[in-house]
Amino acid sequence: MGMVSISKIQEALVDFCLFQTDYIASEREVRKLLESAFAAADYTRKVSLITHEISSYAVELDGEDETEFWNDEAFDSSLVSEDGVILGTFLEEPISGSVGGEVTVSKGYQVVYDVITDKILLLYVVSTESTDGMTTYYRTEVEEFEDFALYGFIVSVAMQTCMNLV
């Protein structure tokens, strides 16, 4: 577990956004948008985000990670990032169903900053949430964020990131 600064993340977001827009947006435009979106957090430039291991499959009970479901070898082989931070989660409207109780299934993307590679990872995520407080996540790395909207993405990722500053 480590720490990473907002300015380092912003640099990685520039490359990510340019790739997702197929380089239609200019680097200058993306930088200005990111600076504006993170302007509300200007006073936080000296604070950071806490990094942690992010696995391709995760289980949470009442919002707390439950790693005891995995032995060390299984957990290590499922790591997507050994030292990263989830910057934002972008899920579509959930699908409700009933499997031995009320279960909500959602799909979408998570955007992760990986400290080791100094890059943004895009993860396709499927999550299930039950009424008893258990949530599972299945994540796999993908390259394309379908229906990527630059302005909405930048505002949302800035807001979600700033909520996790320490």
Image: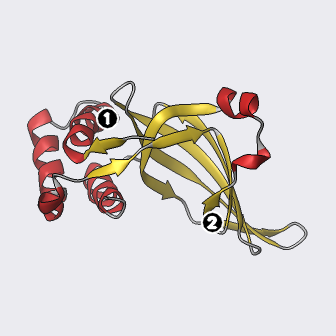
Give the residue at x 49% y 47%: 110
**Mark number for residue 16?**
1
Disc 2 is placed on an element classified as loop
Q: Nearer the viewer, residue 17 or 52?
A: 52
- Residue 7: x and y in percent read 19, 42
Q: Is 9 left or right of 78, judged from the image as shown? A: left
Residue type (three-letter) at the residue carrying disc 2 = Pro
Q: Nearer the viewer, residue 121 or 91?
A: 121
Give the residue at x 75% y 75%: 131
- Residue 73: x and y in percent read 74, 27
Q: Which residue is mark 2?
A: 94
Report the Cα–Cα distance between label 2 and label 1. 26 Å
Q: Nearer the viewer, residue 159 or 107?
A: 159
- Residue 94: x and y in percent read 63, 66
Q: Quadrant of the C terminus?
A: bottom left
Task: Decide which of tag 2 and tag 1 comes sooner along the chain.
Answer: 1
Establish if 111 lies above or below 78.
Answer: below
Q: Residues within 10 Å of mark 2 (few under 14, many from 20)?
A: some
Q: Quadrant of the N terminus?
A: top left
Residue type (three-letter) at the residue carrying disc 1 = Phe
Disc 1 is placed on an element classified as helix
**Mark number for residue 104?**
none
Give the residue at x 46% y 30%: 143
Q: Residues within 10 Å of mark 1 (few under 14, many from 20)?
A: many
Give the residue at x 69% y 34%: 75
